[in-house]
Every structure is written in structure tokens, then in C-alpha cells.
Image: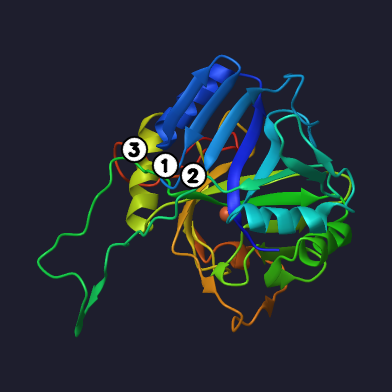
Amino acid sequence: MSLQGIDAVVFGVADMAEAKRFLDDWGLAPVSGANDKLIYRTRDGAEAVVRPKDAADLPPPIEPGNTVRELIWGAANQEELDRTVNTLRDLPGFRIGSDGLPRVTDPNGLSLAFRVSRRTPIVVKPTPNNAPGTHQRVDQRSPIHDQAHPINIGHVVVFANDFAAMRAFYTEKLGFAISDEYPGHGVFTRCQKVGEHHNLFILNRPGKPGINHVAFTVADIHEVIGGGIAMSKKGWKTEIGPGRHPISSAYFWYFENPLAAPLEYYADEDYCTESWQPGTFERKPELFAEWAVAGGIDGTTRRQRPMEDKSGRGHA
Ligand SMILES: [Fe+2]
């Protein structure tokens, strides 16, 4: 099986107007603005689809509240899709939806659909760096972004009710490669043997399946920072960031939002081939973030937002 990546994420939300306001600010291109269905596209054509959470035709939620209701994975062409469908036929919940798309349900209860990808891969050139003796950016200023324009939907992170079953389903049934792992606690997987570090990160959380976050790729750290500051200026609250992950090497910034769990801007993740050596790590905070700003950057002062004092004593 050779899937190209995430073609679409379908969200079920309580407040369509708030979701629309967020996605307009997030920097995606609006395609459809019907009352019961918003469609936004990334630069390469991946879709964020938003529906009212009580829409009768949505797959059931895996957790209460606003959340992801379906992931649509893209195949390169019809032949690849047919090959994928042949490997899916024996999986739980295999069905052909009313829209003609083959579907299965993963061990977490999340609906997965498959289609010929509607994305058009684009070549993005990050800002070149300079260092003494190595001048990759000559006679050219480094950019400052006043808005992010996400390139694709790079990965989704899920909390697994049955971690072993989820790990086996994606690596053995769907053929995802393991990039790195916290044995027994988390596994970073990619749908292509040669590709970005992870499309799906599975975290062990027995009894409480759910979505941890959904991540949108941007060009480089400058777009992470500029896009994040723009969201802050529009009043959206940081969950954590900016910061940098040691595992995957990516820069990140996560925002609370009216669609689901946090949404992330990220850039500069590892790119793996079959020569990549998967690592095993013990889970600890410094492996989530080499460094991170706890509450975002103030859109006006460009300094870290003052930390909220929860001690009741006020600031000295
Ligand atoms: Fe992420």
C-alpha cells in the first residue's frame, strides 16, 4: 500500500461560525461556505472540512465535544487506490460510503476513508540560512510573515484506547513505517517509507480515545513565528509555543480552537528514507520540547505573554 498522506480531515463542531472565523484567520483558502459544510484548502489542496457535530451523515465521534470525525487518506492514482482497497476488504467495518469512497474503522473507532488524492504536490523553498563561510542567502533579506499559509495537513496525533491494537493496525495492516517510538507509550508513524517523519503519532491513553492535535505544515520557522504572532494578534489563545521538538526536529506552535484539540503550525521536520534509524526513547518532558514558550508571544509587544499567576498572591 502506498498512501500519499492526509487528503482531508473532517471535523464535527458545535459552533460553525466560530470554526469559520478561526479557519479564515488560520490562513487556509475557503472553497465552500455552506451553513452545514465548510471546506478550506491548504496550498497543496488538502482539505479541512467542517460539519455541525450533530450532522446525521457524520461517522460517530470517538470523544465528546468538537473533534475529528474522519480522516481521508490520499492514494497517488486509481491503481494505487484499488490496491489499497484490496488490502482493506478484510478489515473491520469495511464499507463503500454513499460518496463511493472505501472506508474502514480503526481500533480507536475513528472512520478512515480513502480516495485518489486531490492534492497537488508543490515545491517549497524555505528561507536559506547564512553562517560564516556558508552564505546561502545573498543580497536577500530574510522574510517576516504577517500571516501563515499552510502547505498541507502533515499529521494527526491520536490518543489510543488500545495502544497495541492501534500500533498493529497502522503498521501491519496499513503498512505505515515506524519513525521513532516511546515503547509502550507512543509511536511516530509515516504512511510512506520515504517521507516526512510522521503523518500519524499514536499515544497510549487507555479508556480515553481522542485526538491530541492536528498539524499544518508551513515553510520554515519564520512562517511558524509570523503565523503564530498573527493568530495571537487576532485573539486566538496559544496552547503551547513557539518551541521545538527534539523528536522530528520540527519547530511548532499550537493554538486552541473551535474545531477540535489544538491545531499546530510546524516546519522543518525530519525527512526519512529506508535508511532512517528509528529511535526508542523514554518519555519525558524534554523530549516533547527542547524549548518552548509556555503561553505564546504577545502580538503587540512581541515578548512572551506574562504568565498567569494562579497562586492568588498577585505579582510581587
Ligand atoms: Fe505535531
Q: Report the disc number at residue 295.
A: 2
Q: Which residue is mark 3?
A: 299
Residue type (three-letter) at the residue carrying disc 3: Gly
User: As displayed, is residue 33 above or below residue 158?
Assistant: above
Pick the residue in front: 227 or 5: 5
Of the four image quadrants, the one with ligand 1 is bottom right
Q: CA distance from mark 3 to mark 1?
A: 9 Å
Horizontal and vertical percent position of residue 157: 67, 51
Earlier-in-chain disc, 3 versus 1: 3
The residue shown at (28%, 62%) is: 127
User: As displayed, is residue 172 above or below residue 45?
Assistant: below
Q: CA distance from mark 2 to mark 3?
A: 12 Å
As drawn, is 143 to the left or to the right of 12?
A: left
Q: CA distance from mark 2 to mark 1?
A: 6 Å
Disc 2 and disc 3 in contact, CB within 8 angstroms = no
Secondary element at image label 1: loop
Q: Which residue is mark 1?
A: 305
